[in-house]
Amino acid sequence: MHVAVLGGGILGLTAALRLAQAGARVTVLERETEAGGLAAGFRVGPVWLEKFYHHIFRSDRAMIRLTEELGLDDRLIWQAPRNPTFYQGETHRLDSPLTLLRFPPLRLDERLRMGAAMAYLRLLPPLGMEGKPAAPWIRRWMGSGPYRVLWEPALRAKFGPLAEEIALPWFWARVHDRSVELGYLRGGFQQVYERLVEQIRALGGDIRTGVSVERVACESGRMVVNTSAGPLPVERVLSTLPPRVTSALAPELPEDYRTRYAWGQAYGAHCLIIATDRRLTDGYWMNISDPGFPFMVLVEHTNLMPAGDYGGRHLIYLGNYRAMDDPLMQAEKEDVLAQFLPHISRINPAFRPEWVTESWMFRAPYAQPIVTVDYRDHIPPLDTPVAGLYQASMFQVYPHDRGQNYSILLAEQAASRILS
Ligand SMILES: Cc1cc2nc3c(=O)[nH]c(=O)nc-3n(C[C@H](O)[C@H](O)[C@H](O)COP(=O)(O)OP(=O)(O)OC[C@H]3O[C@@H](n4cnc5c(N)ncnc54)[C@H](O)[C@@H]3O)c2cc1C
């Protein structure tokens, strides 16, 4: 059986590995020149750095298992970094029950209520949460203070005007799945992607990068994938692209399928990365809860990994999720630097633009599904109405937030489904 896998991110590569291990012939088609999708890296000195900040949690067991399988687990480092929140011009540590108890922007009763609600989300399953929005639940159980100070800015930054309609099970999973300790693959997660590519190739699989899929058709009982490098006839196709993109590429999918599953909205991701000649803050992940900032998160990667790994560079991500037609998604790097850098002085008044020695900018479409209350009804099954065409994407891991771990689990399910 020859299977074409559309997309060379973690989902496509894991599915391809499992299919190849079971004896199938696989061809992975990836538009970019490197595999890795949203978690792909670029070279900073001798090592890889993700284009978008990445770490894993203790609960990411499938990802941990995959690093073991690929012989990379000795590079997986676990740390409990300081994670602050920037609120009303001040930086406050907020990354554990104890730091919540001491979090000055909230009253003591608000801290206690929020702590109890967080414990509930962490410990209990999401019973009766489906179909309900997160925002009223947070206001009711944590209180209006925590909502206003912490959750409203976070939800707005991630989902824009649809923040009030975000599904409660997604919020539950976001709290439930997270650990205080964060894992990082020293040298970059791209090593996972390189090893996956090596292993798939060793099993006879074909990985074609720089090849864009343009159409998937069923011709005389066979599937044909039309690509920028010509047609590829196969027996089965697994698309790991967003359902909206799969529907656009496969004209034979019926209208009622499209209406139901080519649905909803997604934001793109944008990251400006700066290298500085010194430390900027003492935290790793800083949520920005103050209005007027042009970025929603500041991630000082070299407070998780040593700057020495990157030739002494201190590496800082300034991240955003935005509508794919937002002007920021088209802006030139120099303009974004000019817009963003003055705001860094609000966080560290000593900061001078001369500290910045290098910068990079990345953007990606379809990076954050907008998981509104009716999202579940629009998650496509693995099988599609076109025989031989399967669909498995990070848009199908709800209620979990997208993450490499959940793409791996779905990839394994999809591979079993195709093989069965
Ligand atoms: C800002 C940000 C931060 C994140 N942080 C974390 C984190 O800390 N930890 C974590 O585990 N996860 C994190 N994630 C999520 C993680 O990156 C994704 O869950 C994971 O990479 C999804 O993999 P995937 O293979 O399912 O999809 P993708 O990575 O999106 O792969 C799809 C692939 O399809 C390719 N493609 C698209 N169209 C075509 C076409 N027409 N033809 C051929 N190829 C095509 C794309 O180039 C891409 O490589 C983050 C994501 C973002 C955006």
Image (cartoon, rainbow, N blue to C red):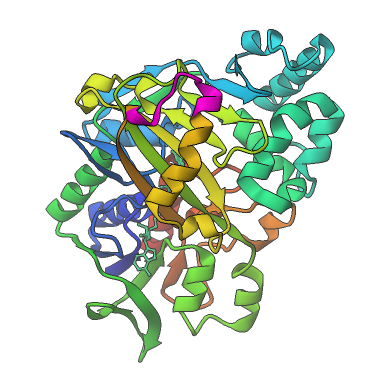
Instruction: Please say if 222 is above or below 115.
Output: below
* Residue 148 on image: x %, y %: 78, 31
Residue at x 81% of width, y 25% of height: 145
- Is 349 magenta? The answer is yes
Q: How many marks?
A: 0
- Is 395 magenta? The answer is no
Of 409 and 344, nearer the camera is: 344
Of 189 and 420, nearer the camera is: 189
Quadrant of the image occupied by residue 310: top left
Residue 409 seen: no
Locate residue 142 relative to residue 331 in the image: left or right.
Answer: right
* Residue 413 on image: x %, y %: 44, 52
Quadrant of the image occupied by residue 346: top right
Locate residue 177 relative to residue 194 in the image: left or right.
Answer: right
Residue at x 64% of width, y 8% of height: 98
Residue furthest out toward the bottom: 220
Tell me the quadrant of the picture where the C terminus can be found.
bottom left
Residue 365 seen: yes
Residue at x 39% of width, y 79% of height: 216
* Residue 70 on image: x %, y %: 23, 36
Locate residue 349 relative to residue 398 in the image: left or right.
Answer: left
Residue at x 37% of width, y 45% of height: 39
* Residue 355 on image: x %, y %: 33, 27
Of 76 and 420, nearer the camera is: 76
Instruction: State the extent of the magenta-drawn residues as a range.
Output: 345-354
Instruction: Please say if 268 is above or below 189.
Output: below
Tell me the quadrant of the picture where the N terminus can be found.
bottom left
Of 35 and 386, nearer the camera is: 35
